[in-house]
Image (tube, rainbow, N blue to C red):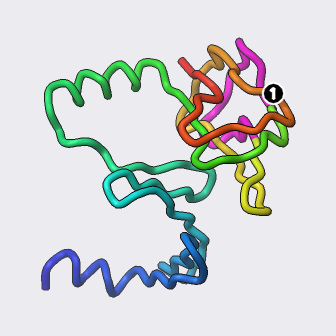
Amino acid sequence: MGSAGWLARLVKATRIGDGVYRVETEGRSELVYVAGPANNRWAFWNGQVFRQTPADSAAARDSRVKREARQELSAPMPATVLKVLVTPGSKVKKGDTLIILEAMKMELPLRASADATIAAVHCREGELVQPETVLVELV
């Protein structure tokens, strides 16, 4: 059996609304939000944003290396900034909530993907932000 067949037995995804899926695996059930056009999809799960990656060209690799040195946390969809929990110079640990957004009547906590220092905060509470707006820079 190929890896796709093996994976299908372990993960069950059920569409429960426009862009909202219930993903069940290993006895756990979690919500995943998916949006964007077919050539530029993103998924929001557990405080993290996942996006399709561009073709693996030399330019894309160089761009990825630069982004990894200085991480950016961006808005996954149009949202209102509910809370900003960090300031420039703050040290954060992987999984710490940095910002809480509100979109589609739900709170979206944006979390640090690794231990880092906050280099800049580009939003304020109450501000309406658009998709891909950089909210926080980490180093």
Determine whether 120 is above or below 73 in the image. Answer: above
What residue is drawn where x is 59% and y is 83%? Answer: 16
Determine whether 94 is above or below 118 in the image. Answer: below
Find out whether residue 95 is within the magenta segment.
Answer: yes
What residue is drawn where x is 65% and y is 19%? Answer: 118
User: In the rendered view, does 38 fall on the left or right side of 122?
Assistant: left
User: In the rendered view, does 124 fall on the left or right side of 65?
Assistant: right
Q: Could you say whether the residue bearing mark 1 is in a helix, strand or loop? A: loop
What x and y, as percent, mark residue 81?
78, 39
Determine whether 108 is above or below 86 in the image. Answer: below
What residue is drawn where x is 63% and y is 40%? Answer: 130
Depth order, front residue of 46/43: 43
What x and y, as percent, mark residue 116?
58, 23
Report which residue position mark 1 lands on.
Answer: 124
Depth order, front residue of 115/22: 22
Identify residue type, mark 1.
Arg
Q: Which range of residues does the magenta coloring cover? A: 85-99
Q: Quadrant of residue 115?
A: top right
Find out whether residue 103 is within the magenta segment.
Answer: no
What x and y, as percent, mark residue 25?
48, 79
Quarter placement of the N terminus: bottom left
